[in-house]
Amino acid sequence: MDLFIEGINQAIQMIITGDREIFDITATTLRVSFTAILISTIIGLPLGIVLGLTTFPGRRLILTFVNIGMGLPPVVAGLYITMLLWRSGPLGQFGFLYTIEAIIMAQILVSLPIIIGLTSSAFQQLDHKMLLQIKALGATRFQTVTLLLKETKLAIFAAIMAGLGRVLAEVGAAMMVGGNLKGETRILTTAMVMEVSKGNFEIAIAFSFILMTLAFIITFILTSLQQRKENV
Amino acid sequence: MRPIVITLLTLITLISTGCTNQTSESASEIILATTTSTEDSGLLDKLIPMFEEEHNINVKTIAVGTGQALAMGEKGEADVLLTHAPEAEEELVESEDVINRKRVMYNDFIIIGPQEDPANIHGETLGDAMEKIYETSSAFTSRGDDSGTHKKELTLWESANRSPFNESWYDETGQGMGSTLQVGVEREAYLLTDRATYLAHKENFDDIVIHVEGDERLFNIYHVMQVNDEKHSHVNGTEAQLFVEFMVSTPVQAVVEEFGIDLYGQSLFIPYTE
């Protein structure tokens, strides 16, 4: 228990004194997580809508893969991306391994299925009578999607939050493809693993405190947006 | 939907601009694959900035076990290696995967364990100690990760003519030295560790003591070597060679000699060039 209090003290101290390293690590964490979740949302939302609203051959198979992907162990994502990005691998010439971009790729790989899966199930649950009615009122395709997005707002926010939670908590893949490079690819979770293995428990606890605070703030903002009443 | 997208975009722009001034994009960079002990001890945090300043080359330090570091060298995935498994390294020299291998420094391995000393090995010779641990089936924690330390441990069992690897008292963690140390301490087991890691963790546990030390077979010798850029086309040979020369240069050796004295009252690594 002393260690825990010490850790929180250390975290507060590091934040107050404006520790350069902790600022870098936190900024990198946020940058990676937001970029990954933004890209996942931009790609995943339309795909989820299409999978949820339309029927076509092979759709069920795709949904099965998406659902498997929702539980994809991050280490597996890390391993595959590492092999892809190796100098001797297919994408080797770009030199992506051990960069922020590599971590973002891994984070997209673990969060994209969550966004697609949860979006598509939200759209599948829409009342078919409502769809008919929208069509009957002569809405354009864009208007239809806008209306449906409003209808599924709760579920979509939940999808983004679930994805973000996964990305913020992820450590195995980030370690493998990022290499935990000081000042470059070190994020809060990989820094924690490293500090624990160094025996610096109070620094690890300080990092955990910062990570949890971030998670709380972000989720709080998203929840408020989700629960906000439409004043139209 | 628009508000979130705008919020997210603003946040990202803010954050991205906040940390784009990380490492100035220098013309070249090298990947250094090394062992966890050099990174965990903090030695590389001191040396790498010196090198980067001197040559304007960005060094990406990947701290893995020696086994993985050597494998990265073999595949040409790293440019320069700093490892401590002389025999395995020589194999790579022979296969011409690495060139320009140079001795850098050493520290030593020690056998630590609970103060109660259930196998009664305190002060024994290395051979007798291994023998007694085996005979008394005392808990022993191994890294089991093909690292330099693990390779060393295997040779010790081999020279004692014992193979405890399937015994219930013998645990393999498959993790780095720091984590293995913690597992070993929790299980009140004996284990082989390098002195640097032990000293770094010492304050976290009280009743663990050094039982065996000083045998010359426990010397832990580090070599630096560059990956052969003639055999592996992607390797940055020139920069790697600069790093090898840097590691054996006089100023670096002076830093190595001093390193750790302020914290632990003793050097963690001892300069040992050829």
Image (cartoon, coloured by chain):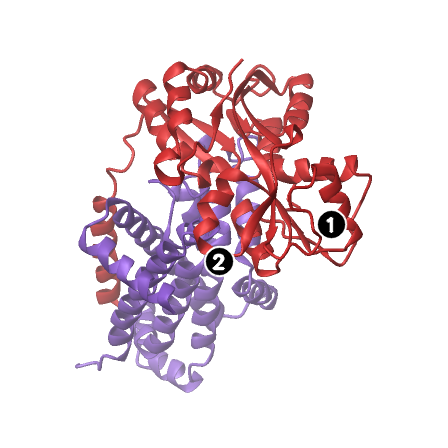
Vertical comparison of B13 with B62: above or below: below
Q: Amino acid at mark 2?
A: Val
Q: Amino acid at mark 1?
A: Ile
Q: Residue at x 49, y 56 (%)?
A: B206
The hue used for chain B is red
Q: Residue at x 75, y 41 (%)?
A: B128
Q: Residue at x 40, y 50 (%)?
A: A191
Left or right of B95: which side holds A226? left
- Percent coordinates x, y for residue B265 in the rendering: 39, 37
Question: In whole angstroms, how far apart are the C-alphas of marks 2 and 1?
Answer: 45 Å
Q: Which residue is mark 2?
A: A110
Left or right of B250: which side holds B14? left
Say few, some or many: other residues with alpha carbon within 10 Å of mark 2 (under 14 / 14 to 19 / 20 or more).
Answer: many
Report in which chain the residue with disc 2 lies. Answer: A
Nearer to the camera, B202 or B141 = B202
Report in which chain the residue with disc 1 lies. Answer: B
Vertical comparison of A229 with A85: above or below: below
Nearer to the camera, A60 or A171 = A171
Whether residue A45 can be seen here? no
For the image, the number of numbered tags is 2
- Percent coordinates x, y for residue B182 in the rendering: 54, 55
The residue tagged with tag 1: helix, strand or loop?
A: helix
Q: Which residue is mark 1?
A: B133
Say few, some or many: other residues with alpha carbon within 10 Å of mark 1 (under 14 / 14 to 19 / 20 or more).
Answer: many
Q: What is the letter of the purple chain?
A: A
Left or right of A133: which side holds A120? right
- Percent coordinates x, y for residue A125 in the rendering: 45, 81
Location of residue B252 by image quarter: top left
Quarter in which the N terminus of chain A is drawn: bottom left
Nearer to the camera, A14 or B256 = B256
